[in-house]
């Protein structure tokens, strides 16, 4: 099984959209580039 993590971006910030709804987003304090490097280091 191949798992591919997704990073949702909005206005340059990492977010999670509830069922694609932009009015129901959760914002995260991670910088997108740092999160990408973290995912990459985990394999």
Image (tube, helix red, strand yellow):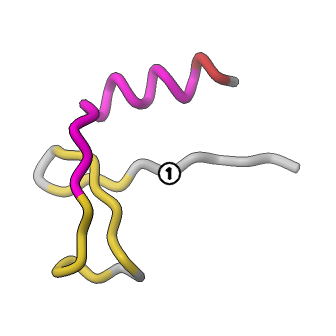
Residue farthest toward the top in the current orientation of the protein:
41
**Residue 31 falls within the magenta-colored stretch:** yes
Q: Is residue 43 left or right of residue 14?
A: right
Residue farthest toward the left in the current orientation of the protein:
11
Figure label count: 1
Q: Residue at x 28, y 34 (%)?
A: 30
Q: Residue at x 88, y 50 (%)?
A: 1
Q: What crowding class fits label 1: few (fewer than 14 Cα within 10 Å), some (14-19), or many (20 or more)?
A: few
Asked if residue 23 is positioned above or below residue 9 in the image, the reply reads: below
Q: Residue 6's spot in the image, x, y percent?
A: 50, 51
Residue farthest toward the right in the current orientation of the protein:
1
Q: Residue 18's spot in the image, x, y percent?
A: 36, 77
Which quadrant holds residue 41?
Answer: top right
Q: Is residue 41 left or right of residue 7?
A: right
Q: Residue at x 41, y 82 (%)?
A: 19
Q: Nearer the viewer, residue 5 or 25?
A: 25
Q: Residue 15's spot in the image, x, y percent?
A: 28, 56
**Residue 38 falls within the magenta-colored stretch:** yes
Query: Which secondary structure is most common in the magenta stretch?
Result: helix
Asked if residue 30 is positioned above or below residue 10 in the image, the reply reads: above
Asked if residue 28 is positioned above or below residue 23 in the image, the reply reads: above
Q: Residue 3's spot in the image, x, y percent?
A: 73, 48
Which quadrant holds residue 16?
Answer: bottom left
Q: Residue at x 65, y 47 (%)?
A: 4
> Helix, strand, or loop for circle 1?
loop
Residue wearing tag 1: 6
> Which range of residues does the magenta coloring cover?
27-40
Q: Is residue 10 left or right of residue 30?
A: left
Q: Quadrant of the C terminus?
A: top right
């Amino acid at each position: 099984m191949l798992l591919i993590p997704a990073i949702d971006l909005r206005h340059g910030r990492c977010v999670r959209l509830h069922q694609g709804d932009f009015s129901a987003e959760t914002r995260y304090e991670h910088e997108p580039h740092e999160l990408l490097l973290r995912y990459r280091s985990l394999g």
